[in-house]
Amino acid sequence: MGALRDRLDFFYFQGQDKYFESRIDRNGSTVVRINVPPGPFMARDPRVVALLDAKSFPVLFDLTKVEKKNVVTGTFMPPASLTGGYRICSYLDPSEPTHAKVRKLLFSILHSRNDAIIPTFRSNFSALFATIESQLAQQGGKAEFNKPNEMTSFDFIGEAYFGVRPSATDLGNGGPTKAAKWILFLLHPIVTLGLPMFIEDPLLHTFHLPPFLVSGDYKALYNYFYNAASQALDTAESLGLSREEACHNLLFATILNSYGGLKVLFPGILANVANAGQKLHEKLVAEIRAAVAEAGGKVTLAALEKMELTKSVVWESLRLDPPVKFQYGHAKTDLQIESHDSVFQVNKGEMLFGYQPCATKDARVFGPTAKEFVGDRFVGEEGRKLLKYVYWSNGRETESPGVNDKQCPGKDFVLVVGKLLLVELFLRYDTFSADVGKELLGVKVVFTGVTKATSGPATE
Ligand code: HEM
């Protein structure tokens, strides 16, 4: 009953942030034993040791201390039939041989497509902004970002990774809808759609939705990958993976990890920058246009690297609103975990759980502005010292993912595309305004005005 009551608190009576904050207050501690959803009847044991500060959280990155087998979604596991019958890389502990093979495959794709990322991003997102401009003109000064972003991000990622736009294949424009349905089937035990509690809780949080209802959509997505990624699947075979297992993994990494991430991240960045106002826009315009001019009017990786403020804005968005908020692991041995004030004894086998927004908004690290967006937080030597407390990638921002760890292999890619979004925006506009609201997993952005660039380098 306690777990059930907690689930209702989490989704309906308190909401996520309050759920954790109230338990910190109640226990006078940032390391607490609590229940997490979904609880009955999908999770055998909802109990976790929650790590809710910047100091205790990184235990979850230490693979000598935690086992990461079957824990990516926490205390429940979606049916394997949703992923072709395979346990995908995200569910594997690095001790399992397939884990490193899949990570090698992903690194190889990202590396081999390095030169395609910028031009592909620019062609897709300049078309998106052109659409927004025409909608602003036609729809009385309002143009929604999220929906067109979903179509654009989906096409961009397919084209960037495999050279084939999903919308130009049999998938047509149906990719994002099929993806959304499949993601819902995977994650429904831990999301709320905002429906009335008495309908939603029994429907989404009590039993698994039957996978056959989404198998047609999954098959259509799979076919896209099987055809578009044939070169990557050759590489997979040379790494010792079957084409089939590799293809299910590519689908998961592209749709859930990459597309799912950008679907939340891009509106999040725009919302923060819109709310920050014109002063920040002016500084971003100056930095971005100067770096591009210096690179001969081209947007290059080297030019992006020079954009300190732009980078900081992306990191700050990832800190404030980490798109993947939950991390889990089982204690491999009896452990002592330190918070800022105390030391806690945890037993071997206990489930550790980190709620990132609490850890990355820890006032003991980020000071009185911890809960605010400060665009230039990570600029300069002092600012960069704080990067080790940015955890969005399931690792510190000062560390790089390798073949044998669990840090997000898309870490560099995410930073690059986050910066590219701002570059595209501020090469095109001097400033913009937008209304910001709530969405299922993040924020909703509606542009209310853009001011076309009055100066700046001629770009290629
Ligand atoms: C905003 C975008 C993204 C965010 C916020 C994000 C975040 C994360 C996080 C937190 C994890 C660790 C999950 C866990 O084990 O608890 C993870 C893992 C992973 N991410 Fe990302 N990611 C993003 C984009 C990408 C991209 C572009 C790729 C493309 C390669 C990617 C591929 C993966 C894969 C394959 C894993 C599983 C790694 C493993 O278990 O060894 N992600 N990501």
Image (cartoon, rainbow, N blue to C red):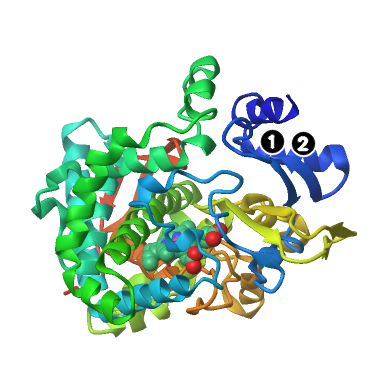
The kind of residue tagged 2 is Ser
Crowding around mark 1 (Cα neighbors within 10 Å: few <14, some 14 to 19, many 20+) is few
Residue 79 location, x and y as percent?
44, 43
Assess whether mark 1 and mark 2 are in contact (beta carbons under 8 angstroms): yes
| Residue 391 in sight | yes
Above or below, 22 relative to 431: above
Say whether mark 2 is within 8 Å of ligand 1.
no
Q: Residue furthest right?
A: 342
> Can I make out residue 126 in this image?
no
Instruction: Name the kind of residue labelled 1 in the image.
Output: Lys
Query: At x 78% / y 66%, what residue is drawn?
Result: 333
Q: Is residue 399 above or below residue 222?
A: below
Which residue lies under the disc numbered 2? 22
Q: What secondary structure is found at the residue carrying circle 2?
A: helix
Q: Residue at x 54, y 28 (%)?
A: 206
**In x, y percent, where is residue 94?**
54, 72
Q: Secondary structure at mark 1?
A: helix
- Residue 132 disc label: none
Q: Quadrant of the N terminus?
A: top right
| Frontmost residue, 47 versus 292 | 47
The image quarter containing residue 34 is top right
Image coordinates for residue 220, horizontal then vertical, percent? 19, 47
Rendering quarter of residue 224? bottom left
CA separation in Å, label 2 and label 1 = 6 Å
**Is residue 206 shown left or right of residue 143?**
right
Q: Residues within 10 Å of mark 2 (few under 14, many from 20)?
A: few
Q: Is residue 364 left or right of residue 75?
A: right
Residue in the image at 79% along x and 45% along y: 33
Q: Which residue is mark 1?
A: 18
